[in-house]
Image: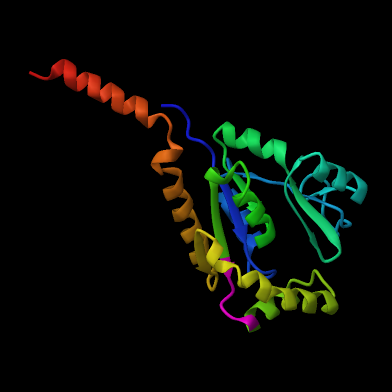
Amino acid sequence: MTARRGLLIILSSPSGAGKSTLAARLRDWDPTIRFSVSATTRAPRPGEMDGREYHFIDEPRFKRMVSDGDMLEHAHVFGNFYGSPKGPVEQAITEGCDVLFDIDWQGAQQIRNSSLQDSVLSIFLLPPSIGELHRRLISRAQDDMATVERRMKRSWDEISHWDSYDYVLVNDDLDATERQLQTIIDAERMRRPRQPGLTDVVRRLQMEFEDTAL
């Protein structure tokens, strides 16, 4: 049977709701899932490596890629540009590989309106409470308090777009949410439109039936 067309899996949430952790867990669950490494104009954080967490590029180059149509989606967030290079994603989807995106609602909307929209599976993660969201942002110790507060103020704008996603999960238990994500992906992979070889199988069965029919 011809290999299925790959999924373009979008995982979104407000900062601190767990999307990066769950994205990493999904890749541990299925190492064949490719992670879309975004490009950004922000400086690397301690421990980050170019080409692994992000492609770190300067602003002029980023803008050239956008104007040349080489970004599948892009956004300006907290003073920096973020975007997803288009070519590697298109190639992976065509080859039947799933590609995972850890992006915000703006990027998700752009991808849903792109030429790859038929391959999109979008999932939004909600925090169990705003208080818990704030606690997680502080406990991960990645940002100063001013940045934490900016992220908190932006969180409601993120959450307000929850109903534009295919699936919405409340991440109140990391292990349970991971299992739910696995179930969703397994089911979406089996959808009839994602299995182009099924038509040939049915035709073969029809021919066998006609050959053996009395």
Instruction: Pick the residue in front: 162 or 56.
Output: 162
Q: Is residue 84 left or right of residue 199?
A: right
Residue 93: x percent and y percent? 59, 37
Q: Is residue 38 above or below residue 19?
A: above
Q: Is residue 69 above or below residue 162?
A: above
In the rendered image, the quadrant that contains the N terminus is top left
Does residue 104 appear anywhere in the picture? no
Residue 25: x percent and y percent? 59, 55
Q: Is residue 192 magenta?
A: no
Does residue 173 appear anywhere in the picture? yes
In the rendered image, the quadrant that contains the C terminus is top left
* Residue at the image point whose x is 48% and y is 66% from the top: 176
Query: Start and end of the magenta stretch?
Result: 125-130
Q: Is residue 90 left or right of residue 186?
A: right
Residue 69: x percent and y percent? 76, 40
Q: Residue furthest top?
A: 211
* Residue at the image point whose x is 82% and y is 71% from the top: 143
* Residue at the image point whose x is 51% and y is 65% from the top: 168
Q: Is residue 68 left or right of residue 172?
A: right
